Amino acid sequence: MAHIVIIGASTGGLPAAYDMRHLLGKKHQITVISNTDTFQFVPSNPWVAVGWRTREDTTFKLAPYLKKKNINFIPVAADEIKPDENKVILADGQVVDYDYLVIATGPKLAFEEVEGLGPINGHTQSICTVDHAEKAWGEWQEFVKDPGPIVVGAVQLASCFGPAYEFAFIMDADLRKRKIRDKVPMTFVTSEPYIGHLGLGGVGDSKGMLESELRNKHINWITNAKVTKVEAGKMFVDEHNEKGEVIKQHELPFKFSMMLPAFKGVDAVAKVGEDLVNPRGFVKVDKYQRNPKWNNIYSVGVCIAIPPVEATPIPTGTPKTGYMIESMVCATAHNIQRDIEGKEPDTEATWNAICLADMGDTGIAFVAMPQIPPRNVAWMKKGKWVHLAKVAFEKYFIKKMKKGTTENLYEKYILKALGIGKLR
């Protein structure tokens, strides 16, 4: 009997546990380790931050649903991985042995890399976790009583730009509903070399479409931006040219700000060292999702190492979209199954990007196949249907995570709806 241990229980770890149980049957042991006892649907956090959703709408306790699938659950953070001993040491001192380890931790949020950034020890809000989104909602309620300037965006080395655009447009929509949009100057600040780069080198006419949307919504922007520090009510931003030279320094006043931070690998994983992770602490994997040194360690999701699509004047990371994560999970489960059976791995993840970006009362859908240019497909469409599709996707995904089903919902529903077909 093999013991598969999964660290993380979010959009990578929880589907991985279900896929493993589906493929391996009841004869193998599966254990999920998580630093929280709750699943949260992260894409809904922008809505939570303006009060369009609550924690109860987008989260649920993990233990009952994992128990139904005969999956062990330990809601204690991992503190250390000992790859040569096949052990995980937990924060409370427990030792968990494994035959196969799947690292699906998600990222560490590196607010500390910019002075004054973040909702805990800084002056900006975040939508990266439901706790952060709830705090932002509390600040938002005070802000709308006495509105003023907003600064929103993503700092240097950020790798997930879509939610920053989403939140800018969602705030705009909420302010218009409240009939106070005219009292709120908005500035979008991003490390991207141009609007709509998205860490992907652009997708179709994402540059033109998103620039047009920002103009229509009266949102100014600064690209090639490096946030140097944040003080209470003021953000300091260096704007650069294509050579990476500072061409203008901005002092941006704000009464509300949400800035996405850079990501790093979590401490328990990063401290294993360079055989497991890159300098930012992201897990090194081969085309089968395995670590090159320790072939019984796999990794999926935001915590894996993917090089940037291209060099940019201000460093940007590469996003890992939902479809990519689902594809990594599928490949990992099949390859572990084959290894248990004494066969060589043969399944590779399909690294294409799919994004449904909500804009409050409309939305934009992006498809990049493959993620890194040149592409076979670079497709994007705008419409209210995207907003409705994202609402439906939220409800469907949460229901799927509670039921423990393993169907590939991106190919079964989203691509079919977009008229694109399969990505493989």
Image (cartoon, helix red, strand yellow):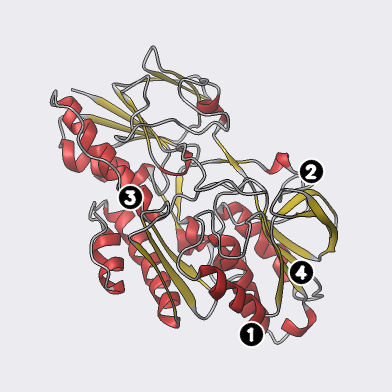
Residue drawn where x is 81% and y is 65% of the image: 254
Res 134 → quadrant: bottom right
Q: Amino acid at mark 3?
A: Glu
Q: Amino acid at mark 2?
A: Glu
Q: Amino acid at mark 1?
A: Lys
Residue drawn where x is 38% and y is 40% of the image: 300
User: Marks 3 and 2: CB-CB under 8 Å?
Assistant: no
Mark in front: 1 vs 3: 3
Question: In this view of the protein, can residue 67 be seen by the observer?
Answer: no
Q: Secondary structure at mark 3?
A: helix
Q: Is residue 77 above or below residue 386?
A: above
In the image, residue 334 lies at what x, y percent?
A: 21, 38
User: Marks 3 and 4: CB-CB under 8 Å?
Assistant: no
Label 1 vs 3, first from the N-terminus: 1
Q: Tell me the number on the disc at residue 26.
A: none
State how far apart marks 3 and 4 are (Cα). Answer: 38 Å
User: Marks 4 and 1: CB-CB under 8 Å?
Assistant: no
Residue drawn where x is 49% and y is 51% of the image: 319
State how far apart marks 3 and 2 are (Cα). Answer: 35 Å
How many other residues sit within 10 Å of disc 1, few (<14), some (14-19) or many (≥20)?
few
Residue drawn where x is 72% and y is 48% of the image: 244
Label 1 vs 2, first from the N-terminus: 2
Q: Quarter holding the N terminus?
A: top left
State how far apart marks 1 and 3 are (Cα). Answer: 36 Å
The residue that label 4 is drawn on is: 142
Q: Tell me the number on the disc at residue 326.
A: 3
Q: Tell me the number on the disc at residue 177.
A: 1
Label 3 vs 4, first from the N-terminus: 4
